[in-house]
Image (cartoon, rainbow, N blue to C red):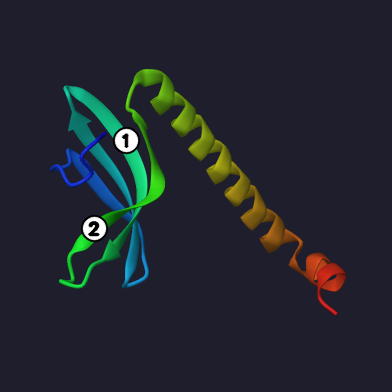
Amino acid sequence: MIDLNAPSIYEKIIQDTGHEQVRLVINTFRDVEYISLRKYYLDFNEEWKPSKDGITMPLDFENSRKLFEGLVEILSLAESKSILEDEFKDLLDSIYLP
């Protein structure tokens, strides 16, 4: 089992609600790098601890490529949505708002 408390090579807080965080973390275990997207919580001593909620997988080229492809698709959809909302706001409002 990967030690989620081991020092990380890379760590980025993706979301922070004050009592819960979602972190993107890269750790090494037995000379293999792993990438994790995991929820962290504040314990009673006000220290951040990893929860069981999340995923961990080897950080290899294929996994990295698929993650990157997915993020590019999500960003493209978000950009398209923003453009549609900006250009067709009145029409969308007339359809979806009472």
Residue at numbered disc 1: 35
Q: Which residue is drawn at 34% across and 66% down?
A: 20
Q: Which residue is drawn at 59% across and 49% down?
A: 79
Q: Which amino acid does label 1 sit on?
A: Ile
Question: What label sits on residue 49 in the rendered view?
Answer: 2
Q: Which residue is drawn at 33% across and 40% down?
A: 36
Horizontal and vertical percent for residue 92?
80, 65
Mark 1 touching mark 2, by CB under 8 A?
no
Determine the CA span between mark 1 and mark 2.
17 Å
Query: How many residues crowd mark 1 within 10 Å: few (<14), some (14–19), many (20+)?
Result: many
Count the marks: how many? Answer: 2
Quadrant of the rendered structure where residue 1 is? top left
Q: What residue type is labelled 2?
A: Lys
Front position among marks 1 and 2: 2
Quadrant of the rendered structure where residue 63 is? top left
Horizontal and vertical percent for residue 26?
25, 37
Check disc 1 and report its element: helix, strand or loop.
Answer: strand
Return the disc, 1 or 2, that comes first in the chain's sequence: 1
